Amino acid sequence: MDWKLEVVVVPVSDVGRAKAFYEEQAGFTVDHDTRLRDGVRVVQLTPPGSPCSIVVGSGVIESPPGSVKGLQLVVADIEKAHAELTARGVPVSPVQHFEAGARVNGRGEAWNSFVFFNDPDGNGWAVQEAPAA
């Protein structure tokens, strides 16, 4: 039996602001924006090419806004991802890699080149370059 991760709920303080950030700046696709009843709104967004989505909303999760860290996207070209995020106005780190447990600017070996950013609430994202197939 397959167990597939479909959705990760990301706690935010302002659903409209989060939706705008993920759609307009991070480049995610809005799958739906549904108001189920008063106080319950579910916005599902999917990164380009990903089988897994995120949900931001109100009345969805009790975790404090900004408390999710370590969300990770994987891309084929880290410099291109950095340029795209920067062009969309996302405050993103320089390309970095890990060396002796510390972040160091510049590319690393296979699977060791990243950029980092936070959404407006401080939920933390890493973008990692996958080695060429």
Image: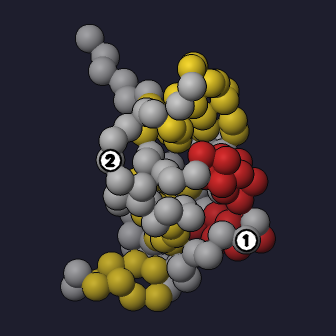
| Residue at which label 1 appears | 89
Q: Position of residue 76 (x, y in %)?
A: 58, 56
* Disc 2 + disc 1, Cβ < 8 Å: no
| Above or below: residue 100 compared with residue 32 | below
- Mark 1 is surrounded, within 10 Å at the Cα level, by few (under 14), some (14 to 19) or many (20 or more) other residues, namely few
- Tell me the residue at 50%/62% (across/down): 121
> Is the residue 79 above or below the residue 25 in the image?
below
Left/right placement of residue 72 relative to residue 21 reads left
Residue 30: percent from left, percent from top: 69, 35
Q: Quadrant where the N terminus lies?
A: top left
Dot 2 falls on a residue whose secondary structure is: loop
**Is residue 91 placed above or below 23 in the rendered structure?**
below
Position in image of residue 88 (x %, y %): 76, 66
Residue 41, compared with residue 133, is above or below; it is above
Farthest residue to the left: give it: 100
What distance separates the C-alpha of mark 2 from that of mark 1? 27 Å
Q: Is residue 82 left or right of residue 106?
A: right
**Label 2 sits on residue:** 63
Q: Amino acid at mark 2?
A: Ser
* Dot placed on the residue nearer the N-terminal end, 2 or 1: 2
Please tell me in which quadrant of the rendered image residue 62 appears: top left
Is disc 1 placed on a helix, strand or loop? Answer: loop
Residue 5 sits in quarter: top left
Q: Is residue 51 visible?
A: no
Q: For this rendering, which residue is in front, 8 or 82?
A: 8
Of 16 and 106, nearer the camera is 16
For the point 46% across and 80% down, the residue is 96
**Along the line of sight, which residue is nearer the eye, 31 or 73?**
31
